Amino acid sequence: MTRQELRAGLLDAYERQMGLCDRLEEVADSLPGRLDRQQCLHLARMIGPLIRRAHAAEERELFPHVVQHHEGGAELVEQLRLEHVEDECFAEEVQHELMQIGQGRTDLAPEATGYMLRGFFEGIRRHVRRERELLAEMLRTRPN
């Protein structure tokens, strides 16, 4: 895979995750009274597959380089893998809550739902920023 293909694939994964975060923020901002239930159902269906695909691409393309070329790379990759597991578990909780909202059956208070959504998307944004920095470093040091 060329540098351009690698960069394009990972950047696409990061953009999709950031777009998801923006849409989740819209939902959080619309609580409690201006919810779009169809949007919640749509987000619930897409969140798991999107996060899993992005993580798989990162683990396949970025992590080997980090281990090989970054000081403390193995430990850093282990930390990032743990974040992936945490993000995927949190995504399942968010997915469940979005399905409940979409079906008009939520058990959580709007404040709790907003707190959950914000915790999730802020964590994803932080993780993406960190991996973008690693990608930029990798592209500076990786031969064509």
Image (cartoon, rainbow, N blue to C red):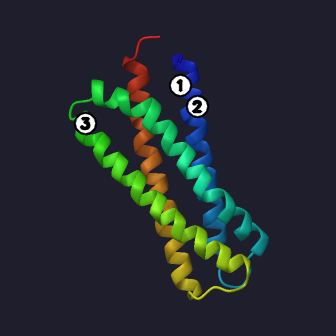
Give the image location of residue 29, x and y in percent: 63, 73
Query: Quick one: label 1, few (<14), some, or many (20+) residues within 10 Å?
Result: some
- Classify 75 as above or below 142: below
The answer to which quarter of the image holds residue 86 is bottom left
Q: Secondary structure at mark 1?
A: helix
- Classify 26 as above or below 47: below
Tell me whether the residue at label 3 lies in contact with that at label 2, contact meaning CB atoms closer than 8 angstroms. Answer: no
Identity of the amino acid at label 1?
Answer: Leu
Q: Is residue 31 visible to us here?
A: yes
Which disc number belongs to residue 6?
Answer: 1
Q: What residue is shown at x 66% (from left), y 65% (from top)?
A: 44
Residue at the left extreme of this rendering:
72
Which of the two labelled residues, at mark 3 and mark 1, occupies the earlier sequence position? 1
The residue where tag 2 is placed is 9
The residue where tag 3 is placed is 74
Marks 3/1: CA distance? 21 Å
Q: Nearer the viewer, mark 3 or mark 1?
A: 3
